[in-house]
Image: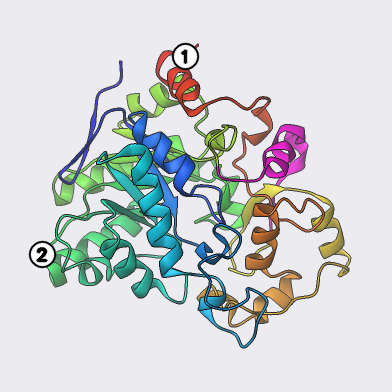
Amino acid sequence: MLKSLKIGTYTIKFPIIQGGMGIGVSWDKLAGTVSNEGGLGVISAIGTGYYQNLKYTAKSINSRPFDTDNLYSFEALKAIIKNARKICGDKPLGVNIMCAINDYSKVVTDACKSGIDIIISGAGLPTNLPELTKNFPNVALVPIVSSAKALKIICKRWAQRYNRMPDGVVLEGPLSGGHQGFTYEQCAMEEYQLENLIKPVKDEIKEWGDFPLLAAGGIWDKNDIEKVMALGADGVQMGTRFIGTHECDADEVFKNVLIKATKDDIHLLKSPVGYPARGVHTNLINLVDKREGPAIKCISNCVTPCHRGQEAKEVGYCIADRLADAYNGKEESGLFFTGANGYKLNEIISVKELMHKLLNGE
């Protein structure tokens, strides 16, 4: 049996973290259930304005001008966390907040005010995260990195400015779903594969103290968990596998896209963020390649690297709109992110059954 995991002051019964997936793939139902079953459920803070059919959104999601409150809603985030708590009670509950979003500092503060226990943060280096959470000392902080160098930068900055160390670190290799912390070329290079990154990052952790390393990217079953833990990981973060659960907040169309996908359907895709992103090659990608995709209108000013839609026009799609279409079950225009092993998904089961499989290998 796998040992429990300590992140800050919180004890996770099983060292399995469910990766935060947005828009709307991991909200209250999935995250609350994973935490209730002994893992760490993680809510995605991106695109909360879409929660419960725009119920908490101040403006129509299609309104102008360019504004982050077309996409994000504090009231919705509070409701998601509250509803997750109805499932998992006071068991540890996390939130994933991307550094690249334009309202990063506000979302971090909002999550803390809403009673979240653990913040997991990547898509950039969360160098000022301790400053944003200084009034909430019980909130555990877990950056996501793709190299020992990135972890060193974070630890050095946190130590000098805040006298603070991470409470854990997620090391994400290049087989993960969504955006990668690597170039296209690096994603295929041996030295950047997860199994070859664990030791250097573990060694870097020892330079700063002792906090858990959570391996992520391409982890699918008990054998994968045991493999990375034998290499020095203290636990794992898994995203795609949890999409194949009844409790996953994604639309059934989203789940079926993955079930239908073959290994050859899963590719690295161009993204307005500037880094490659892994997802399913659907008809949307064919349309985008021919410049026949849906109209590009920046209504949410969601991520800094897109420069208010400039990069979206270069790449051929708005990432916020296309991820929202996936959440809403629009197969023709949705963008469906998945890890490299997403083609292995062939059934929808309960979180309880999935956790049993991950722990017992059955």
Query: What's the amino acid at mark 1?
Result: Gly
- Closest to the camera, between mark 2 and mark 1, is 1
Residue, x 30% and y 56% (percent of image)? 151
Residue, x 52% and y 50% (percent of image)? 21
Residue 98 visible in the snapshot:
no
Q: Position of residue 327 (x, y in %)?
A: 64, 53
| Distance between the alpha carbons at the discs numbered 2 and 1 | 41 Å
Residue, x 46% and y 76% (percent of image)? 102
Of callouts 2 and 1, the N-terminal one: 2
Q: Tell me: 331 left or right of 116.
A: right
Quarter holding residue 299: bottom right
* Image quarter hosting the N terminus: top left
Residue closer to the observer: 55 or 26: 55
Q: Position of residue 136 (x, y in %)?
A: 17, 63
Residue 11 visible in the snapshot:
yes
Residue, x 53% and y 64% (percent of image)? 47
Q: Position of residue 207 (x, y in %)?
A: 17, 49
> As displayed, is residue 8 above or below residue 4?
below
Q: Which labelled disc corresponds to residue 361?
A: 1
Residue at mark 2: 163
Q: Tell me: 352 left or right of 91.
A: right
Query: What's the amino acid at mark 2?
Result: Asn
The magenta stretch is 249-269
> What element does badge 1 sit on?
loop
Q: Position of residue 302 (x, y in %)?
A: 54, 73
Model colouring: rainbow
